[in-house]
């Protein structure tokens, strides 16, 4: 495989085998918890039920409708009532997709640094295209990202590697030249299975499973700036 040594604005070599950085979306690039939790609490309020505290809902964001409906209504996907609740949740969330959702602090500067360093970037999320594509457009990212892959873009979602491999294919980059960045153990599994270095981020939702340091990522970072530092650091 041919590799190119890139130079950062400060003249520091960027990791030579990396040409593209792929990101999870919710909990990694954007804080969508306020709108996802808001849609959940709208459903509870419509039924005259007490709302669930945001602090309890936030860790469930990575589990999507399954996590939100499970916490709010105590139902699982195996139960008959789940499908109707899920569909209502999706409809309500779609109506408030960007009401309170914003990039995390430091993300804009990080994406600018990647561009300065000659790196492309893309999004690989388990969020369906129904939400992922308009969210990317609304944030001004759809023309900047080399690929936006949703949970239904391929026949498989993470932790299967297929979505990551599809992002690399669309960008014309070898999977070995990509790094995958996420806030869930499934992200790390998907990245490793796809043959990509992996980065776990502490600012994300993290879920309620194993601690982040047990996921097996190549590196764990506390801030977006630290990701840039890692990419620019010598091997």
Image (tube, rainbow, N blue to C red):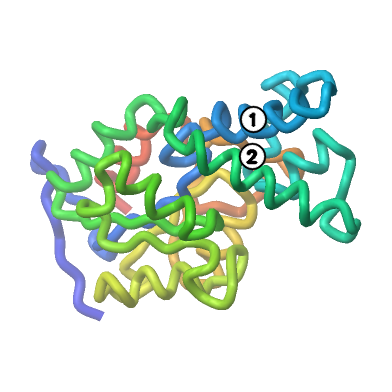
Q: Residues within 10 Å of mark 1 (few under 14, many from 20)?
A: many
Q: How much space separates mark 1 and mark 2, taking CA atoms?
A: 8 Å
- Could you say which quadrant of the image residue 223 lies in? top left
Determine which residue is flagged by label 2. 61
Instruction: Please indicate whether residue 14 sits to the left or right of residue 160 in the image.
Output: left
Q: Residues within 10 Å of mark 2 (few under 14, many from 20)?
A: many
Q: At which x and y percent is residue 227?
A: 36, 40
Instruction: Please indicate whether residue 20 sits to the left or right of residue 204 in the image.
Output: left
Q: Nearer the viewer, mark 1 or mark 2?
A: 1
Instruction: Please indicate whether residue 9 sits to the left or right of residue 160 in the image.
Output: left
**Residue occupying image coordinates x 48% and y 51%:** 131
From the viewer's side, name the closer residue of 40 and 213: 40
**Residue occupying image coordinates x 64% and y 39%:** 61
Q: Is residue 103 above or below residue 214?
A: above
Q: Is residue 159 above or below residue 116?
A: below
From the viewer's side, name the closer residue of 126 and 135: 135
Are dots 1 and 2 in contact, CB under 8 Å?
Answer: yes
Q: Is residue 215 above or below residue 70?
A: below
From the viewer's side, name the closer residue of 108 and 9: 108
- Could you say which quadrant of the image residue 149 lies in? bottom left
**Residue occupying image coordinates x 47% and y 38%:** 97
Q: Is residue 78 above or below residue 65?
A: below
Q: At which x and y percent is residue 210?
A: 74, 44
Instruction: Please indicate whether residue 172 sits to the left or right of residue 104 in the image.
Output: left
Determine which residue is flagged by label 1. 37
User: Dot 2 lies on which element?
Assistant: helix
> In the drawing, what numbered circle is on residue 185?
none
């Amino acid at each position: 495989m041919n590799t190119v040594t890139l130079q950062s604005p400060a003249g520091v070599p960027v990791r030579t085998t990396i040409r593209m950085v792929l990101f999870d979306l919710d909990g990694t690039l954007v804080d969508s918890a306020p709108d996802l939790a808001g849609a959940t609490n709208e459903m509870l309020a419509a039924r005259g039920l007490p709302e669930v505290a945001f602090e309890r809902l936030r860790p469930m964001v990575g589990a999507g409708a399954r996590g939100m409906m499970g916490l709010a209504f105590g139902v699982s996907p195996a139960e008959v009532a789940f499908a109707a609740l899920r569909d209502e949740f999706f409809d309500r969330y779609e109506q408030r997709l960007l009401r309170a959702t914003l990039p995390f602090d430091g993300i804009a500067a990080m994406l600018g640094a990647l561009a300065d360093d000659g790196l492309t970037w893309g999004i690989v999320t388990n969020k369906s295209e129904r939400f992922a594509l308009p969210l990317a457009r609304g944030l001004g990212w759809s023309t900047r990202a080399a690929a936006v892959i949703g949970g239904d873009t391929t026949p498989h979602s993470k932790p299967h590697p297929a979505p990551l491999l599809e992002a690399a294919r669309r960008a014309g980059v070898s999977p070995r030249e990509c790094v995958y960045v996420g806030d869930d153990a499934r992200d790390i599994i998907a990245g490793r299975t796809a043959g990509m270095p992996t980065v776990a981020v502490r600012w994300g939702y993290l879920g309620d499973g194993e601690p982040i340091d047990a996921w097996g990522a190549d590196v764990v970072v506390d801030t977006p700036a630290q990701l840039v530092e890692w990419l620019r650091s010598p091997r």
